[in-house]
Image (cartoon, rainbow, N blue to C red):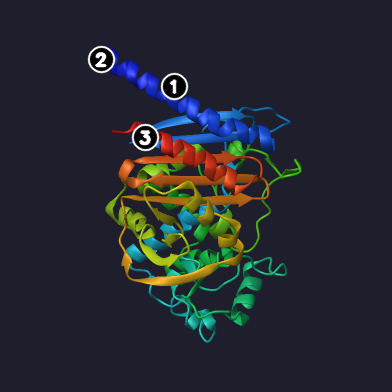
């Protein structure tokens, strides 16, 4: 019986390897991606599939520890930090931004709740103006900013929105955001090889990014970069983070409640429910719906939003996902709590979100079909 079980396990692993190969190799060929790392978690068991090199110059191979810029996937860490601040009693997501951060009193932020900042329903733009390069200039911009729609009625994806949520959460706890995330939150999550600033000792594991035109590039951070898009990490730490999100790996109760807070549905918008940064779809979900939710219109144009009253509690039969990009890196992460399955795909080149979603969807579908 033990031999039969071992053989069955080998067959599943071979099948998964084949599925990942078939999903990833066309991306490398079509878009000329130097390196791709895939991490898969199934009930807490991890599988890693690595393709290509971290740098065309060094030819170092991709590993589960290779550090990638994960762009807006960083926002899920910021959302967790904000919910942890709420668990500590430092703030409430129903507070207005100006109540939680008094320097904003007398501005449009008298009508923007913290939950709006974390669900892209504040009406803040996707990017701050080019003239804003530091936190002081950001605050000047925010003082003069006016929303185009009534706050909470429209979802417009926003870097400054989540950036301000992280900034305010750190202020409410009287800590520096970078220090608190790097030295407290990430270790508690078990993400010990994840950085906001890559230390010298880990620089050899930091992949070189490449633009669509194959020019080498790395992140040049702007205002509120750490909060909005500044994380560098690898597949090993992300699958650990997914395990915590699916309660396969356990953390202390306040942090687990903070994770649950990020899975709470606050607004219905387009094809999905907007949680705190995570985007939630009823599971099973078809590929077309997932592509629509991750499409350019949702990113650049936005859509009407309807507040859920009361908020939707965390759902097990759901697919939660998040994309991430910088000019030289691409990320997509998705997981299904009820099935305890999750996938992350990281690449050191910018390539279309549609191709990332196709690849991960194919892997998740294979995993779901293999389960009893």
Label 1: few (<14), some or many (≥20) within 10 Å? Answer: few
Confirm or deny contact between disc 3 and disc 1 (CB under 8 A).
no
Compared with 130, 74 (above or below) is above
Q: Give the label, 3 or 2, closer to the camera.
A: 3
Q: Secondary structure at mark 3?
A: helix
Q: Is residue 94 left or right of residue 238?
A: left
* N-term-proximal mark, 3 vs 1: 1
Q: Secondary structure at mark 1?
A: helix
Label 3: few (<14), some or many (≥20) within 10 Å? Answer: few
Residue furthest to the left in view is 1
- The disc at residue 369 is 3
Compared with 312, 217 (above or below) is above
* N-term-proximal mark, 1 vs 2: 2
Residue furthest to the bottom in view is 106
Image coordinates for residue 173, horizontal then vertical, percent: 42, 66
Label 2: few (<14), some or many (≥20) within 10 Å? Answer: few
Residue that badge 1 annotates: 14
Confirm or deny contact between disc 1 and disc 2 (CB under 8 A).
no
> Would residue 290 be visible to someone looking at this image?
yes
Q: Residue at x 48, y 83 (%)?
A: 110
* N-term-proximal mark, 3 vs 2: 2
Disc 3/disc 2 C-alpha distance (Å): 24 Å
Q: Is residue 62 left or right of residue 170?
A: right
- Choose top left, top right, bottom left or bottom right for residue 365: top left
Image coordinates for residue 50, horizontal then vertical, percent: 55, 29
Compared with 292, 106 (above or below) is below
Residue that badge 2 annotates: 2
Image coordinates for residue 175, horizontal then vertical, percent: 46, 63
Q: Give the label, 1 or 2, closer to the camera.
A: 1
Disc 1/disc 2 C-alpha distance (Å): 18 Å
Image coordinates for residue 130, horizontal then vertical, percent: 72, 67
Q: Give the label, 3 or 1, closer to the camera.
A: 3
């Amino acid at each position: 019986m033990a031999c039969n079980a071992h053989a069955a396990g080998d067959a599943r692993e071979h099948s998964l390897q084949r599925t990942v190969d078939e999903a990833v190799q066309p991306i490398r060929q079509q878009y000329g991606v130097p390196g791709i790392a895939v991490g898969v978690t199934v009930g807490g068991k991890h599988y890693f599939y690595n393709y290509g090199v971290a740098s065309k110059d060094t030819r170092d191979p991709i590993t589960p520890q290779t550090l990638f810029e994960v762009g807006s996937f960083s926002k899920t860490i910021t959302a967790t930090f904000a919910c942890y601040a709420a668990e500590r009693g430092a703030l409430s997501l129903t507070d207005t931004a100006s109540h939680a951060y008094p320097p904003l009193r007398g501005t449009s932020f008298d009508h923007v709740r913290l939950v709006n900042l974390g669900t892209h329903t504040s009406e803040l733009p996707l990017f701050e103006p080019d003239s804003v390069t530091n936190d002081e200039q950001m605050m000047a911009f925010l003082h003069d900013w006016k929303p185009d729609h009534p706050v909470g009625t429209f979802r417009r994806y926003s870097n400054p929105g989540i950036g301000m949520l992280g900034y305010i959460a750190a202020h409410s706890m009287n800590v520096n955001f970078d220090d608190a995330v790097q030295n407290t939150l990430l270790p508690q999550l078990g993400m010990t090889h994840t950085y906001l600033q890559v230390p010298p000792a880990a620089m050899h594991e930091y992949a070189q990014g490449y633009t669509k035109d194959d020019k080498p590039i790395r992140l040049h951070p702007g205002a509120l970069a750490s909060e909005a898009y500044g994380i560098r990490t690898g597949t090993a730490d992300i699958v650990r983070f997914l395990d915590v999100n699916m309660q396969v790996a356990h953390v202390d109760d306040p942090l687990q409640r903070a994770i649950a807070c990020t899975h709470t549905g606050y607004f219905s918008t387009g094809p999905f429910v907007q949680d705190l940064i995570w985007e939630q779809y009823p599971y099973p979900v078809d590929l077309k719906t997932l592509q629509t939710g991750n499409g350019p219109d949702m990113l650049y144009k936005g859509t009407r939003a309807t507040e859920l009253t009361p908020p939707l509690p965390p759902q097990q039969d759901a697919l939660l996902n998040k994309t991430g990009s910088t000019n030289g890196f691409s990320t997509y992460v998705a997981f299904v709590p009820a099935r305890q399955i999750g996938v992350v795909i990281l690449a050191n080149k910018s390539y279309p979100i549609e191709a990332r979603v196709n690849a991960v969807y194919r892997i998740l579908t294979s995993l779901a079909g293999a389960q009893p």
